[in-house]
Amino acid sequence: MAVFSFTSVFFAFCWLISQVGGSAICNFTASSLSFDSDTTVLSTTFYSNGSTIPLPGTVASCAINSTIATGDLCRITLNVQTSCMSSIFLEAWLPTNWNGRFLASGTGGIGGCVDYTVLQSGVQQGFATLGQNAGHNGSTGFDFFLNNRESLIDFGYRSTHIEAVTGRQLVEQYYGKPATKNYYMGCSTGGRQAFKTAMMYPEDFDGMLAGSPGVDWLRVVSSKGILAGRIGWPDVSSPAYLSDDQWTAIVAEQIKQCDGLDGVIDGILDDPTKCGFNPETCACGTGVLNNSVCLNPYQVNSVRQAYLPIADTKGDIVYPAWDYGVATDVFSKYPTSYAILSDYFRGAIYNNSDWNSSDFTAADMDFAVKVNPGSVNTGESDLSAFFARGGKLMAYHGRNDNSVTSRNSENYFNDVQRTLNLTITQIHSFYRLFFIPGMHHCTGGPGAWDIGQNGPVPTDMLTVQDNALMSLVEWVESGVEPESLVGTKYTDDNHSMPVLAQRAHCVYPNVSVWDGIGDTKVASSWNCRLPS
Ligand SMILES: *[C@@H]1O[C@H](CO)[C@@H](O)[C@H](O)[C@H]1NC(C)=O
Ligand SMILES: *[C@@H]1O[C@H](CO)[C@@H](O)[C@H](O)[C@H]1NC(C)=O
Ligand SMILES: *[C@@H]1O[C@H](CO)[C@@H](O)[C@H](O)[C@H]1NC(C)=O
Ligand SMILES: *[C@@H]1O[C@H](CO)[C@@H](O)[C@H](O)[C@H]1NC(C)=O
Ligand SMILES: *[C@@H]1O[C@H](CO)[C@@H](O)[C@H](O)[C@H]1NC(C)=O
Ligand SMILES: *[C@@H]1O[C@H](CO)[C@@H](O)[C@H](O)[C@H]1NC(C)=O
Ligand SMILES: *[C@@H]1O[C@H](CO)[C@@H](O)[C@H](O)[C@H]1NC(C)=O
Ligand SMILES: *[C@@H]1O[C@H](CO)[C@@H](O)[C@H](O)[C@H]1NC(C)=O
Ligand SMILES: *[C@@H]1O[C@H](CO)[C@@H](O)[C@H](O)[C@H]1NC(C)=O
Ligand SMILES: *[C@@H]1O[C@H](CO)[C@@H](O)[C@H](O)[C@H]1NC(C)=O
């Protein structure tokens, strides 16, 4: 009985709050950078733990029709009008079993899809959790950007800030008191949104978890087109072009040649930047690759080009090299494998639905950086305000990232250190980067990559050691600086037991080194050390 009436209170509150929303007002005279906004509550529904939440009308490219509640929760959906031509969709999951904290999430790729994995894991851990759509719906397309400066601003930086502000207000109204601390987590574009927000709105969050961040986003996106051009695309009949089978064989050969450098033969290059691969070894006649996959001299040159860093039109290096041992599909199968470049340049850079990316060059990249629509780029590295207010930033990046090359995170960390003129101890007091060997982009890969970033985990894995968000909370609230995180490799990569392997991941520049004795699948056999 007691449970029943408690639940009805939440039903009643869900109803009550639906009466609070104002009506949308289109402020036609507002300057484009105005944060004046108006909020409409679209729905409020109570869901019990384990029940299905239908998501009718979600655009197909978001590839989700329903999700599952991970606790008893009040789901509130809202629309925030950000200008007369733009709005942000927000979705709050407010758990009955609240831990007193607020968690906001980011989006991936070109934005446009609520990250339900974060809503699910946030509520599993008791956070009042928000999701957002970055100002448009869908993970592909460009119509939403065409001729719409305001929508570009939402994607560039406004949506996460609005999410923070609205989320805090919502939490306070719903629970009758503000959250004790405010957190953020997101990956890829969500990682970019983290750094952008830390820079522009340092007060928004106390702790931020930034995965595989697409900082310098315009160059991340441009790099795919430039690398595709270097290996002969779009002329797939060119003698310089390589087949899928050839790329597979070459990447396998890189792993074979460099696997032992880190002391363990496990198919994982812990630090791919240490690999000194020479494409000549894969030429026909060397006997390394057989006749069906070995390289002609043009292809040897293509492979060499594919691993050079990217320069701008002045010849200055502006984006780091692709890592050895990482699948190349994202540029070798461009554009089937990567629509973002074409979509973003059509909608946001050239405002032209017919623009074709087939002869993409550094000039297009430079132009995009100059335009910087909606201030999307995070090339700047001045995190001084976030540092000064005591914010904590935990970043992670897979060393087998097949979309954003991992060196991008290394460069960015070093830039921030230089910009703020900090010692390594000082920068580590607020910003820690963890490399995860053998992890693809955000999730997946042969390594022990799961640190709780991929949806709800078995409850005994919700520890400060195993869960990055818990570790961040411990850092923010108890001042315990995280020195390592244990990553887990689950059966089927989807939290199915048993656990296949675990391993410690370290704070950059430290690396995890096998002790030479213990089982390499056990975390305690790995220690964090300064690199030799
Ligand atoms: C509308 O825009 C004007 C001019 O930018 C601004 O001064 C005003 O506060 C805005 N009003 C509302 C209700 O957003
Ligand atoms: C969503 O529903 C549509 C229509 O029933 C279906 O075609 C699609 O495959 C579903 N998508 C997912 C991810 O379940
Ligand atoms: C939700 O249900 C799952 C599965 O029964 C259970 O493990 C979990 O503790 C429940 N969560 C809450 C917040 O009650
Ligand atoms: C995005 O989808 C949500 C939920 O389906 C809807 O309420 C909102 O109006 C859509 N936004 C845009 C800009 O189409
Ligand atoms: C975008 O293109 C459309 C159609 O060609 C044109 O009407 C509009 O003025 C352009 N917008 C901008 C911002 O250049
Ligand atoms: C050639 O090598 C590739 C890659 O190692 C392998 O998949 C293929 O089966 C080999 N072909 C022949 C004819 O041995
Ligand atoms: C872009 O141009 C290439 C080469 O001319 C052509 O093969 C391709 O179909 C075009 N793509 C689009 C989407 O129009
Ligand atoms: C950087 O910090 C060092 C040590 O605190 C100091 O000596 C130096 O003057 C600083 N450099 C700049 C450019 O501020
Ligand atoms: C995990 O993936 C496997 C293989 O795809 C599937 O059989 C299983 O049902 C999945 N388990 C969960 C909990 O999603
Ligand atoms: C890096 O490793 C050294 C030992 O080699 C240790 O003293 C130091 O505390 C570690 N740094 C961090 C940030 O964990």
Image (cartoon, rainbow, N blue to C red):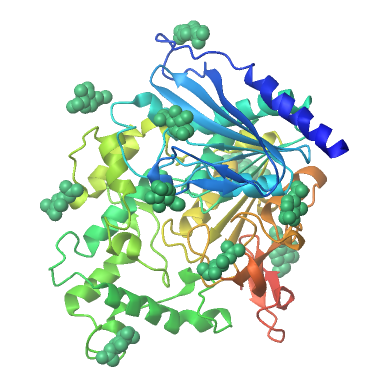
User: Could you say which quadrant of the image residue 530 lies in?
Assistant: bottom right
Is residue 400 found left or right of 246 in the rendered image? right
User: Could you say which is closer to the camera, residue 229 or residue 412?
Assistant: 229
Placement of 422 over or under 375, stated as above or below? below
Residue 501 lies, in percent from the top left, at: 65, 75
Residue plotted at (42% across, 69% down): 326
Residue plotted at (51% across, 25% down): 79
Residue plotted at (52% across, 84% down): 260
* Quadrant into which the N terminus falls: top right
User: Could you say which quadrant of the image residue 384 lies in?
Assistant: top right
Placement of 168 over or under 239, stated as above or below? above
User: Could you say which is closer to the camera, residue 138 or residue 236?
Assistant: 138
User: Could you say which quadrant of the image residue 71 lies in?
Assistant: top right
* Quadrant into which the C terminus falls: bottom right
The answer to whether residue 509 is seen in the rendering is yes
Instruction: Please tell me in which quarter of the rendered image ligand 9 is found.
Output: bottom right
User: Could you say which is closer to the camera, residue 337 or residue 416?
Assistant: 337
Residue at the far right in the pictured view: 2
Is residue 136 found left or right of 523 in the rendered image? left
Residue 452 lies, in percent from the top left, at: 65, 57
Residue 192 lies, in percent from the top left, at: 50, 43
Is residue 257 found left or right of 148 in the rendered image? right
Residue 49 lies, in percent from the top left, at: 70, 46
